[in-house]
C-alpha cells in the first residue's frame, strides 16, 4: 500500500515537472489557490458548506470508477483495496475538511468525513449502458461529450438559480450563472488527440475562430436561461448580469486560446496561474487573449496548413 | 498523385526512415509491407503531415491533408461520443455536411451508441465510414483489415476496388498478404526504414514466396515437431 501511494506521489510530481514546475512550488501555489477560492465561495454564498461538501464528494467519487477499482483489486487484493480507497478518499477530502473546521463547520466536516469513507466502499460505472441525449449532437465534440459528463452539474446550476430567486439572493443567482460557465469551460480543459485537429481543413486562425464561435454559442445556450430568469427578477441589476455574462464569454475565449497555445501538451501550471490571476482581475484578459491567440496560431500551424 | 522525395525521419538518434522515394498515382492502390517497426506508420504520419521530417512530400491537391482520409491502426475515440457524432465531427471538419448518415451506415453499426464501447472491429469500421464520407481524394489505410470480421473484410475490399474506379489514390498497409494481393496494383517493401523493393501485380506471387522464404526459412523445422 505504501508503495502504491509512493508511486501516485511520483506520478503527480512528474506531471508538475513536465509542466515546468518544481513540485514543492506547485503544491504551495495549488494550496494558495484552493484557500483563496474556498474563502471566496464562503464569502459569496450562505450555501457554501453544501456546495463545498458536494464538490469534495464529487472529486472523491471520481476515484470509485469500476475499472479503476478492479485494477487496484487485481494488484492488491480485496482487503488492501478497501484500505487504499478509504485512504485515497480521505486524502482528497482532507483540504476540504481543514477548511470546514477552520470555518467552524464541525457538523459538516464530520458528515463529509463519514460520507467520504463510505464512498470508498462503493464502485460505479462511469460508462452507462444508454446514451445520454444532448442538444449539441449536431456539432460535436466538446459540448456533446462535455454535457454528457456534467449534465447533473448543469441541472444543479439551474436548481441553484431557482433557489436563488426563491430566497431572493441575487449573489447566489450570479454564482449559479458563473457555475454554468465554469462547467462549460471545463469542456476545454484537456487537449484532444492530434487527429481531431489535423482533420480540419481550416487554417489555424479559422480553426480557432470556429472553436470560439461554437463555445460562445453553446455556452450561451446553457447560461442564457439563468441570465434571463435573473434579469426578470432583478431588473435593476441587468447591467451586472450582462457584465458577468460577458466575463463568462471572455473566459471561454481565453480558455480556448490557452489550450491551443501549448497544444498538444496539457495546460501547464504557469497558464493555470495566469488564468487564476484573470479570475481575480478580469481586465487582464484583454491583454492575455490576443497574446495567447497569436501563440495558438503558431502552435497549430504545423498541423493546420 | 502523392510524391515522396528523399524522405528522412529520425526520433532522436534513431533513424526510422532513410531516403524514401516513392510516388503514388491516381486511380491506383498501393500496398506497403514490412516487419513490425519497419517504419510504415511513420511513413504514413509523415505523408499526412503529422510528423516533422527532412525531404519533400507533394501532391496535386494542396494542402494534401485537406484531401486525405487517414485510418490509424487503432483509431482513437472520445469517451461519450456516439458513432453518428463521430462521423458528423469528421465530416464537419471537412465542411462536408452529411444529412443521411443512417442510410450510409453500410456496416450496420449502432450509431446511437458510444463509440468507445464498440468492439475493435466496429471501431475500425466506424473510422473507415467516417473517412469515406469526408469525401477524400487520397486514402491511407493502416491495417484496415485488422480485427474486422470476414463479411466486413469483403466489404472493405470492395470499397477499395470502388475507390480505384473513382480514380482515388489508396495506400494500404497490412500484415495479411492475401488482402494486399486482392486489392493492390503495386506493393512496396519497407525494411528498416528503407524502401527495398517495389513489385507490380504480376509479380505478387514471387514477392510472397520471397517474403515467406526470408521470414520463415527453416525456423519451423527448428521446432522439431513430429
Image (cartoon, rainbow, N blue to C red):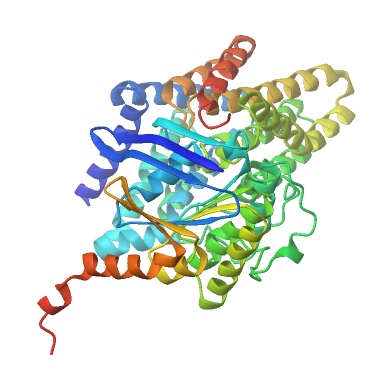
Q: Is residue A23 left or right of residue B94?
A: left
Pick whichever, A287 or B196, lies toward us. Answer: B196
Residue B177 sits above or below residue A219 on the image:
below
Pick whichever, A228 or A290, lies toward us. Answer: A290
* Residue B193, x across and y down, in percent: 30, 45
* Residue B131, x across and y down, in percent: 62, 53
Residue A262 sits above or below residue B224 on the image:
above
Q: Is residue A117 left or right of residue A168?
A: left
* Residue B211, x across and y down, in percent: 28, 65
Q: How many marks?
A: 0
Name the residue: 89% across, 30% down.
A232
Rendering quarter of residue A175: top right
Q: Is residue B40 left or right of residue A128?
A: left
Q: Is residue A14 left or right of residue B107?
A: left
Visible residue check, residue A219: yes
Q: Residue furthest front?
A: B202
Rendering quarter of residue B223: bottom left
Rendering quarter of residue B177: bottom left
Residue A220 sits above or below residue B158 on the image:
above
Name the residue: 21% across, 70% down.
B216
* Residue A196, x across and y down, in percent: 57, 42
Pick whichever, B100 or A21, lies toward us. Answer: B100
Visible residue check, residue A281: no
Amino acid at each position: 500500500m505504501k508503495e502504491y501511494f509512493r508511486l501516485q506521489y511520483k506520478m503527480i510530481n512528474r506531471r508538475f515537472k513536465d509542466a515546468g514546475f518544481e513540485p514543492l512550488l506547485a503544491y504551495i501555489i495549488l494550496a494558495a489557490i484552493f484557500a483563496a477560492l474556498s474563502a471566496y465561495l464562503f464569502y459569496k454564498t450562505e450555501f457554501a458548506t453544501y456546495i463545498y461538501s458536494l464538490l469534495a464528494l464529487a472529486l472523491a467519487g471520481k476515484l470509485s470508477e469500476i475499472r479503476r477499482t478492479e485494477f487496484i483489486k487485481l494488484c492488491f487484493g480485496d482487503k488492501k483495496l478497501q484500505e487504499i480507497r478509504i485512504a485515497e478518499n480521505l486524502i482528497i477530502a482532507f483540504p476540504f475538511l481543514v477548511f470546514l473546521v477552520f470555518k467552524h463547520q464541525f457538523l459538516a466536516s464530520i458528515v463529509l468525513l463519514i460520507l467520504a469513507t463510505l464512498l470508498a466502499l462503493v464502485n460505479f460505472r462511469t460508462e452507462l449502458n444508454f446514451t445520454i441525449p444532448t442538444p449539441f449532437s449536431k456539432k460535436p465534440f466538446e459540448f456533446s461529450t462535455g454535457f454528457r459528463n456534467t449534465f447533473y452539474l448543469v441541472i444543479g446550476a439551474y436548481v441553484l438559480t431557482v433557489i436563488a430567486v426563491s430566497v431572493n439572493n441575487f449573489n447566489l443567482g450570479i454564482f449559479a450563472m458563473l457555475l454554468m460557465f465554469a462547467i462549460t469551460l471545463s469542456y476545454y480543459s484537456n487537449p484532444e488527440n492530434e487527429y481531431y485537429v489535423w482533420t480540419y481543413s481550416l487554417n489555424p486562425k479559422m480553426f480557432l475562430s470556429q472553436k470560439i464561435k461554437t463555445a460562445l454559442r453553446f455556452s450561451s445556450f446553457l447560461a442564457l436561461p439563468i441570465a434571463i430568469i435573473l434579469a426578470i427578477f432583478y431588473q435593476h441589476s441587468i447591467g451586472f448580469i450582462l457584465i458577468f455574462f460577458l466575463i463568462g464569454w471572455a473566459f471561454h475565449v481565453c480558455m480556448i486560446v490557452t489550450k491551443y497555445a501549448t497544444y498538444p501538451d496539457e495546460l501547464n501550471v504557469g497558464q493555470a496561474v495566469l488564468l487564476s490571476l484573470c479570475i481575480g482581475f478580469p481586465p487582464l484578459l484583454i491583454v492575455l487573449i490576443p497574446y495567447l491567440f497569436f501563440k495558438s496560431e503558431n502552435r497549430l500551424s504545423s498541423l493546420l496548413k | 498523385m502523392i510524391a515522396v522525395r528523399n524522405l528522412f525521419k529520425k526520433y532522436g538518434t534513431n533513424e526510422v526512415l532513410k531516403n524514401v522515394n516513392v510516388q503514388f498515382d491516381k486511380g491506383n492502390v498501393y500496398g506497403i509491407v514490412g516487419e513490425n517497426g519497419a517504419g510504415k506508420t511513420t511513413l504514413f504520419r509523415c505523408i499526412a503531415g503529422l510528423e516533422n521530417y527532412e525531404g519533400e512530400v507533394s501532391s496535386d491537391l494542396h494542402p494534401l491533408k485537406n484531401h486525405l482520409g487517414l485510418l490509424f491502426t487503432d483509431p482513437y475515440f472520445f469517451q461519450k461520443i456516439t458513432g453518428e457524432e463521430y462521423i458528423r465531427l469528421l465530416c464537419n471538419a471537412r465542411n462536408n455536411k452529411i444529412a443521411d448518415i443512417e442510410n450510409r451506415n453500410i456496416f450496420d453499426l449502432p450509431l446511437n451508441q458510444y463509440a468507445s464501447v464498440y468492439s475493435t472491429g466496429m471501431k475500425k469500421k466506424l473510422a473507415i465510414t467516417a473517412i469515406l464520407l469526408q469525401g477524400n481524394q487520397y486514402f491511407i489505410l493502416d491495417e484496415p483489415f485488422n480485427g474486422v470480421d470476414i463479411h466486413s473484410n469483403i466489404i472493405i475490399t470492395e470499397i477499395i476496388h470502388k475507390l480505384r474506379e473513382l480514380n482515388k489514390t489508396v495506400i494500404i498497409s497490412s500484415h495479411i498478404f492475401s488482402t494486399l494481393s486482392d486489392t493492390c496494383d503495386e506493393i512496396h517493401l519497407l525494411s528498416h526504414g528503407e524502401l527495398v523493393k517495389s513489385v507490380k501485380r504480376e509479380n505478387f506471387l514471387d514477392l510472397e514466396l520471397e517474403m515467406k522464404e526470408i521470414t520463415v526459412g527453416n525456423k519451423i523445422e527448428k521446432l522439431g515437431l513430429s
